[in-house]
Amino acid sequence: MSRNLRFNPPPVVLTGALRWVLFRAYGPVGSDVDNGVDPREAVRVATSLGLSPRIATRQPRRLLERELDDHAQATLRLEHGRAVALELQRDRALVVLRDIAQRIEVPLVLLKGMALRESAIVAAGSRLIGDVDVLVPDERAWDLHHALTSNGFERNALPENEFHLPRVAHSGLGAIEIHRILLGVRSRHRTSVTFSTLEKGGHLEPVESVGRPVWRTADPVLAAHILVHGLVQHGNDPTEYSMAQMFSDLIDMGFGHPTSPALVEEAYPWVQDEIRRTEILALNQLCRLLRQGAFEGRTELSSPTAEESILRHCLATRFDPRYVDSLRLRWLQPRLSDRNRFVQLTDVFRRSLFPQQEQLDAHYGKPTHAVGNLGRRLIHPFATAARVLRSAVIHIGRRR
């Protein structure tokens, strides 16, 4: 693999369904596309990539009625309805969060999906928003956390980590995640930005649709966070996040547009510790190609270019189980962090072989007996080693 490429995915066959999804999700709205596509397979692929709500929102209804059968249309409408329902739930959660934060005088910075939606950067109902992510002053993070758990939210069993507190969730409002830092977004080497950093630097903008004390980051910082979250933090962990969502968010922010070089150059200094300039330029080029519908006439992706490598990785992590298995080796590498290399490697060893009780329960389920819990702890290192060996065999087989 070239040192300039983050990912080394296999060639990907561009089926008719995949071409349809890429064109309808990103390409020119309303333009003609190959009609010889299995409509149900196309919607299945779109749903797997998390793009069904986007397609349902941006394409004319009559066009979709012409290209899809009744079953496929119903599935697409169902996915769109789910996105709308999640949005409404997140809106209610945000109102409750805002009122609690206002009462205890804690300012909030909306992140990721909610920042994009409340700024009208993404169309309503076009994006699945899993939870409400907010950045708050580090010294007030636990104050807000305690206030939420005192008002009907329940704390997640998993412990806090380097960049956010344990997630809290409400049966009717969904989950809220309180961040202390924007991990990997940095104004100084190995020091992720905080609320204070952004406030003092003038990188926060009020969210008028919600009211005080709610802010969002300026566009270059918002784009930088999307890049780090999608490319670095979750790039090798496809179970939690589809990279196709990153493409959507970046395109909605302007990537791939003739005016995008300004945003690309402004975002790069915030992520240069983690992402090379060539990678951001490749992403911008990929967004340009997706906007143009340039992949509609292709039958395979096998080019060694950086932009195509990123797209192949995105698709292979959804549709190639062997490739996903081969990535497990990378899941054991040090994670995105501000900590030094020795501390990161120590953490890899600890969480891989001797996880905390909450992590063990999340992986295997809660034990019914103390003996069973001891057995899991004894077996876990060997099970981890077996998974690593399996991934290594698949990885070596792919390279031959």
Image (cartoon, rainbow, N blue to C red):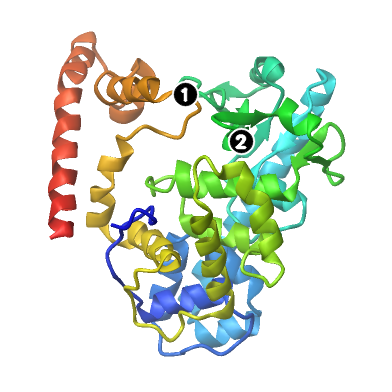
Vertical side of 20 occupied by 386: above or below: above
State the image coordinates of residue 95 (x, y, percent, origin top left).
Answer: 78, 36
Q: Which residue is mark 2?
A: 186
Vertical side of 243 occupied by 299: above or below: below
Q: Amino acid at mark 1?
A: Arg
Rendered image: mark on residue 339: 1
Task: Depth check: give the residue in front, 326 or 379.
Answer: 326
Secondary structure under tag 1 reads loop
Task: Depth check: give the residue in front, 253 or 93.
Answer: 253
Quarter occupied by the C terminus: bottom left
Vertical side of 345 occupied by 231: above or below: below
The first of marks 2 and 1 along the sequence is 2
State the image coordinates of residue 313 (x, y, percent, origin top left).
Answer: 37, 59
Quarter occupied by the N terminus: bottom left
Q: What residue is at 55 percent from the left and 71 percent from the top?
A: 25
Q: What residue is at 69 percent from the left and 57 percent from the top?
A: 263
**In the rendered view, does 231 fall on the left or right side of 211?**
left
